[in-house]
Image (cartoon, rainbow, N blue to C red):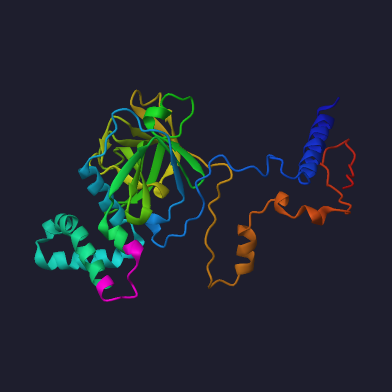
């Protein structure tokens, strides 16, 4: 049997089995079974920090703990990364600039904003303001409990804490977050250590990643280097040890490879694209080619079409263009 004929036979068998499977009801098939990395789907919450599509799993590693200070640090990060309350943060920052020297503004805002924010939301509630919501109040009230886990599904990707991940042949603990410095963009690279779920009143929750961040400042010798387009980080040098938390949906997964040229302690950062995960740009309503943009963004599979539309039809399947192999007509 020629290799070309074997390829054609395998292709015909695969397409035939796929088509027959569309008519099998209540039978789990490759194209109708749930995805492995189910993250819970879209949520109905209005605040972005409460609306993350994430699903945690697994017990935390031994020795993991979460103190009251950890909860305050994590909650402060949540407040600073909730788009819906940026106006409150800006207003309070202006107040701090008027009341304190410039070098104390950030510290005073960190200390005073949570209580000021809660008082402001209580005023909205007492005045029946239309801008008040239970979600806003629960966020201002702060977390009441924290739970720790060893893994999480987020945006269709599986993450594992380093303690559990280091025992496996695969890697699921590498974390990358694009960040902005004062004068240049700085990407953050690290490893997930623990998945933290902050529980708020009325069962609202925020999923966070506690990470060990490798020092990636380009201004510090011995932290990062680029060789022939490959970025290497020194995993023996860390930073942000006192502020290790991020929102789970900020993380993208990366893989670390040994850098034999740089020696022990250096890892090459390898970014990757995940299967069945697509980065689709948003439409610009002001452009004239919206129709083309919509067509480009519609990633549809033929298996999602209604099987009834294929009944009693005669489809000519285009063959592979291989010299010496005749065309094949497949009646359906």
Asked whether 129 falls inside the magenta stretch, the response is yes
Provide residue 82's location: percent of width, then percent of height: 34, 59
* Residue 215 or residue 231, whichever sits in front: 215
**Residue 244 lies within the magenta run:** no
Q: Residue at x 52, y 68 (%)?
A: 284
Q: Is residue 62 above or below residue 158?
A: above
68 lies above or below 13? below
Residue sitting farthest toward the front: 202
Q: Which residue: 28% across, 54% down?
A: 183
Residue 31: x and y in percent read: 68, 43
In the picture provided, is 317 more to the left or to the right than 167? right
Name which quarter of the figure residue 68 lies in. top left
Task: Point out residue 268 in the picture as x, y percentages from the top left corner.
Answer: 41, 32
Seen from the viewer's position, the closer of residues 275 and 292 is 275
Number of marks in picture = 0
Q: Residue, x 86% and y 24% (percent of image)?
A: 1
Q: Residue at position x 37%, y 53% from top?
A: 203
Asked which quadrant contains residue 218, the reply is top left
Residue 186 visible within the image:
no
Examine the rendering and report whether any part of residue 2 can be seen.
Answer: yes
Say left or right for 15 vs 128: right
Q: Nearer the viewer, residue 137 or 15?
A: 137
Query: Which region shows up in magenta?
Result: 125-136
- Relative side of 250 to 18, left or right: left
In the rendered view, would you say 193 is above or below 116? above
| Residue 255 rendering spot, x and y as whole percentages | 45, 34
């Amino acid at each position: 049997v020629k290799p070309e004929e074997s390829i054609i036979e395998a292709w015909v068998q695969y397409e035939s089995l796929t088509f027959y499977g569309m008519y099998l009801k209540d039978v789990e098939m490759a194209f109708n079974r749930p995805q492995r990395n189910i993250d819970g789907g879209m949520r109905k919450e209005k605040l972005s920090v409460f609306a993350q599509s994430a699903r945690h799993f697994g017990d935390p590693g031994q020795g993991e703990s979460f103190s009251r200070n950890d909860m305050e640090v994590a909650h402060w990060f949540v407040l600073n990364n909730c788009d819906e309350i940026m106006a409150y943060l800006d207003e309070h920052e202006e107040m701090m600039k008027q009341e304190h020297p410039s070098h104390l503004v950030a510290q005073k805002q960190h200390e005073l904003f949570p209580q000021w924010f809660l008082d402001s939301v209580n005023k909205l509630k007492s005045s029946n303001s239309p801008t008040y919501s239970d979600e806003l109040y629960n966020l201002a009230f702060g977390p009441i409990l924290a739970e720790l886990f060893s893994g999480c599904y987020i945006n269709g990707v599986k993450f594992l804490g380093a303690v559990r991940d280091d025992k496996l042949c695969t890697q699921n603990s590498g974390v990358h977050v694009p960040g902005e410095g004062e004068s240049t963009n700085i990407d953050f690279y690290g490893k997930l250590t623990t998945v933290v779920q902050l529980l708020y009143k009325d069962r609202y929750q925020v999923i966070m990643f506690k990470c060990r961040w490798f020092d990636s400042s380009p201004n510090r010798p011995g932290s990062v280097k680029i060789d022939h387009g490959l970025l290497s980080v020194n995993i023996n040098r860390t930073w942000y040890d006192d502020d290790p938390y991020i929102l789970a949906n900020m993380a993208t997964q990366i893989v670390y490879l040994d850098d034999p040229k740089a020696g022990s302690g250096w890892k090459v950062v390898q970014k990757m694209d995940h299967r069945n995960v697509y980065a689709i740009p948003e439409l610009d309503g002001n452009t004239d080619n919206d129709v083309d943009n919509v067509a480009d963004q519609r990633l549809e599979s033929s298996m999602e079409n209604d099987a009834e539309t294929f009944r009693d039809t005669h489809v000519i399947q285009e063959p592979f263009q291989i010299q010496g192999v005749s065309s094949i007509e497949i009646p359906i």
